[in-house]
Amino acid sequence: MRPVFAFLLLALICACQAQSDFEEGDNDNDFAEFDDEFVGSNYYTEPAAKNAESNSAGEGAGGDSGSRQEQVPPRKQPQVVDDDDDDGLVEEDDEFEHFQDEEEFEGYDGGDAKDPPIDEQAEPKLNIPNIPLHFRTHWDSYWMEMLMVAGLLAYFANFFAGKAKNARLAQLWFSTHKALLDENFALVGDDGKAENENPGLIKESESLYTLWCSGRTCCEGMLVELKMIKRQDLVSLVAGLMRPQLDQVHIKIELTRGLMDSFVFAVGTKKTITKVFKEYTDLSKFCSLVGKPEDRYNVPNGFAVLSEVPEATSAILETRIITALKKYQSYIDYLHISDQFSGPIQQEEGNTLKQLETKPVLLAGFNLPKHAEMETIKPLLLLIFYLMERLKTYRMSKEGKSKSDKNRQRVEEEFLKSTHAARAEAAAQRREDKRKQEKERILADEDPEKQRRWEAKEQKRQAKKNAPKMKRLAVKSL
């Protein structure tokens, strides 16, 4: 019997210990009074579950021993809990009461029906909608894209065609005049290298070709520029329909200094002469537009003349030149002779303290004919060589030279007046820089006597500079 009583005593001690642990857990939990409201529902605390397991273990042990063990009754839900620590009453308040309110969830199924079970092994069914194809079946929907592709094809086709046509025209002009150029120049088609590897035209762009010739008396060299219509550019061709353009050849000959007398002259179409008169410095400063040149110099109708010295203009526009102007009127654009050529007018000319360098030149511009008529303008190059020889032999009278010298003196005085303020400012700046250098040199010297003398001299200069200016008058006694 002793083992049985020992076992019962041990079971009683375990039960008492479990009960004391449960009550201690309720006291330690500040919210135990709220947890008691959920007793009997699905919310159980962990100590209650442990007590249930201990009770069931105790019953099993009592059954085996043949003794009677009382079942622990379930705890009754307290309605009102009196808390000694807070001295307050906590009334029964169900915080989940709103879940029981039917008006709170109108139109919502309570969820009595359970969701169907999901078969994880079954493959998901994909619903693929019928989406229309990206490309439409009608070509009319792509008229904008087709126009763009057609425009690009037209532009590139025009580029290669225009490029080839300009190259053919330039090569045709060179082949037509090559024999005449070889007769008058020792070097034709200089490419700027020590050894002339590719004599001939130099392609600057798709519409510009240049040719340099040298090795002739009366000139330093001749530059030929073939300016073609921009046939490779479709936009330029369309713009040319409103403002027609022509293929042109521009010739610039740098004459030897002292070869020609001092005068400036130009003749050409009215449109071109008006344009160059506003653009070039020598024409705008030395020349004036001649009125009624058809009656005075017998030039063709539609031509204008810019002249500095009438005597030189009459000498240049002699019978041979007038005949050539009338015969090739449709091909001649302008002729320009000057000993004071300095290029186009500089926009910042007033800021320069030194006159631009001038040089004697002979300029000419001719219109190129069609492909089959290139031989017709070959005499125009002979006209240029004739003018060079004419300038070499022509000499003005004393009256003409005197007028030319007065014009150049007048232009120089105008330039000095326009730059007087700038030159005075530059001179003052130079003097100031010179005094600063002298002061630094004196201060660097350790001799105090030199410094004293220099300071006395500087004070005297400043006093003289600040003194009022007075005019001294000499009075004769009677």
Image: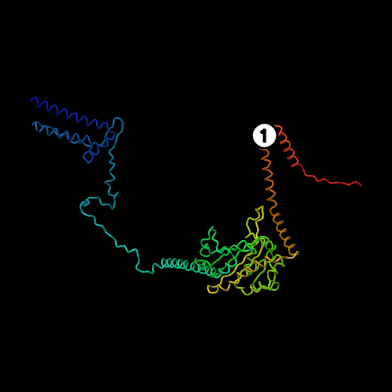
Q: According to the image, label 1 marks what residue? A: 445
Query: In the visual, does 470 lie left or right of 121?
Result: right
- Is residue 355 visible from the viewing direction of this image? yes
Q: Kindly indicate the quadrant of the structure image that contains residue 447.
A: top right
Characterize the local packing of mark 1: few (<14), some (14-19) or many (20 or more) Cα atoms within 10 angstroms.
few
Q: Tell how many labels.
A: 1
Front-most of 407 and 474? 407
Q: Residue furthest right?
A: 478
Q: Which amino acid type is shown beneath numbered disc 1?
A: Asp
Q: Position of residue 340 (x, y in %)?
A: 67, 60
- Residue drawn at (51%, 64%), measured in percent from left and top? 206
Residue 408, position in %: x, y? Answer: 71, 59
Please tell me whether mark 1 sits on a helix, a strand or a loop: loop
Q: Is residue 463 above or below residue 298?
A: above
Q: Quadrant of the N terminus?
A: top left
Q: Is residue 187 left or right of residue 293?
A: left
Instruction: Locate residue 304: give its quadrant.
Output: bottom right
Q: Position of residue 279 (x, y in %)?
A: 63, 62
Residue 10 vs residue 364: left or right?
Answer: left
Image coloring type: rainbow
Q: Does the rendering let one see residue 245?
A: no
Q: Nearer the viewer, residue 364 or 423?
A: 364
Q: Give the answer, above or below, for where 440 lies relative to 386.
A: above
Q: Quadrant of residue 277?
A: bottom right
Picture residue at 70% right of the left edge, 52% below the top: 420
